[in-house]
Amino acid sequence: MRTTSYLGLAIAGLATVAIVQPAYAADFKPYSDAAFAAAQKEGRPILIDVYASWCPVCARQQPLIEQAAGDPANKDLVVFKLDFDKQKAAQRQFRVTKQSTLIAFNGERETGRLLGSTDAKSIATLIASTHG
């Protein structure tokens, strides 16, 4: 009679799950003036995601942003998460008055913005605008 190690099967199952998890081509990071300025200076494609933890629209936007950011064409994209409740000075700098605002840049040039959109195509189009 042959015995099977359940621990071994569990570990193998976890390894399989780790392999199939999607990798995002984009770089997600918290917003800071210094990091934003550096990305602009490098001419990087940039998306600023103004979010609030309590915002249902922001929660619906998140997987759509991640999906678009996972496109290999967006491998150089930087997504800055700007906290609506804590980063008021940055909001004023970008003329933001509501959470769920998405702002796209190609280096130093703003290429577009969306407010409250949960349309996957609109978000993907906004992110595509960061490439020039």
Image (tube, rainbow, N blue to C red):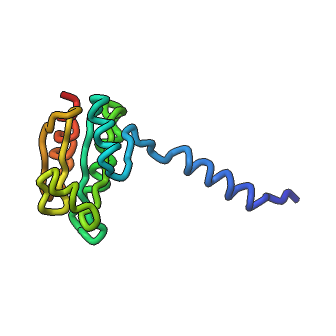
The answer to whether any part of residue 58 appears in the image is no
Residue shown at the point (33%, 48%) measured from the top left = 66
- Asked whether residue 30 is in view, the answer is yes
x and y, in percent, of residue 117 in the image = 15, 55
The quadrant in which residue 71 appears is top left
Residue drawn at x 26%, y 39% is: 46
Q: Position of residue 103 (x, y in %)?
A: 18, 47
Residue 32 versus residue 60 in the image, above or below: above
Image point 34% across, 43% down: which residue? 35
117 and 16: which one is in front? 117
56 or 109: nearer the viewer: 109
Question: What residue occupies the far right of the structure in this picture?
Answer: 1
Task: State the count of labels.
Answer: 0
Query: In the displayed structure, does residue 88 sit left or right of residue 19?
Result: left
Res. 73 image quadrant: top left
Q: Classify 48 as above or below 127.
A: below
Residue closest to the far bottom:
54
Residue 128 placement, left or right of 76: left
Screen quadrant of the C terminus: top left
- On the image, the x and y values in percent for residue 111 come to 13, 37
Residue 26's spot in the image, x, y percent?
Answer: 37, 40
| Quadrant that contains the N terminus | bottom right
x 44%, y 45%: residue: 22
**Quadrant location of residue 40?**
top left
